[in-house]
Image (cartoon, helix red, strand yellow):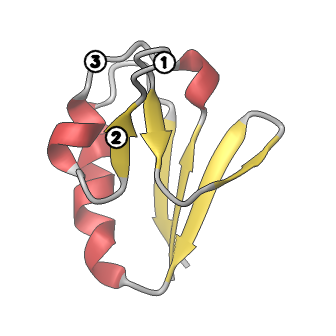
Amino acid sequence: MVVVTLQREKCIGCNYCVELAPGQFQMSKKDGKSVLLHSKEKKGFFTIKSHDNTIFDPCKEAQKACPVKIIVTKMI
C-alpha cells in the first residue's frame, strides 16, 4: 500500500507535484495551492492510501522535487 501525505497550508504553488504526478495532484484555481486528489484531511494534513503501487514512483519524485518539503510518500 502507498501512503501519500500533503501539508497543504505550507504549499507555495510551484506546480512540481502536478508535473511529476498529475494523477495524484492538481493545482487549486481558488488559491493556487496543490490539491492531493481523493485525500482525507486531518489537522491540516491531506492523506491518501492506495493499493495501486504504480503511484509510488511519481509521488516519490514529487516529494523530492518539492522545495518546501511538504509531501511524504511511503510504501507500507
Indicate which disc, 3 or 1, sits on the residue closer to the N terminus.
Answer: 3
On screen, residue 59 versus residue 12, left or right, reads left
Numbered mark located on residue 48 in the image: none
Q: What residue type is labelled 2?
A: Gln
Q: Position of residue 47 (x, y in %)?
A: 62, 55
Name the quadrant containing residue 73.
bottom left
Q: Pointer 3: what residue?
A: 14
Q: Position of residue 60 (x, y in %)?
A: 31, 54
Q: Pointer 2: what residue?
A: 26
Q: Where is residue 64 in the image (x, y as percent from the top left)?
A: 29, 39
* Mark 2 burial class by Cα count in 10 Å: few <14, some 14-19, many 20+: some
Position above or below: 2 against 7 = below
Residue in the image at 26% along x and 78% along y: 54
Q: Where is residue 37 in the image (x, y as percent from the top left)?
A: 47, 54
Q: Pointer 1: what residue?
A: 30
Q: What residue type is labelled 3?
A: Cys
Indicate which disc, 3 or 2, sits on the residue closer to the N terminus.
Answer: 3
Q: Could you tell me which secondary element the residue under label 1 belongs to? A: loop
Q: Could you tell me which secondary element the residue under label 2 belongs to? A: strand
Q: Could you tell me which secondary element the residue under label 3 belongs to? A: loop
On screen, residue 73 versus residue 19, left or right, reads right
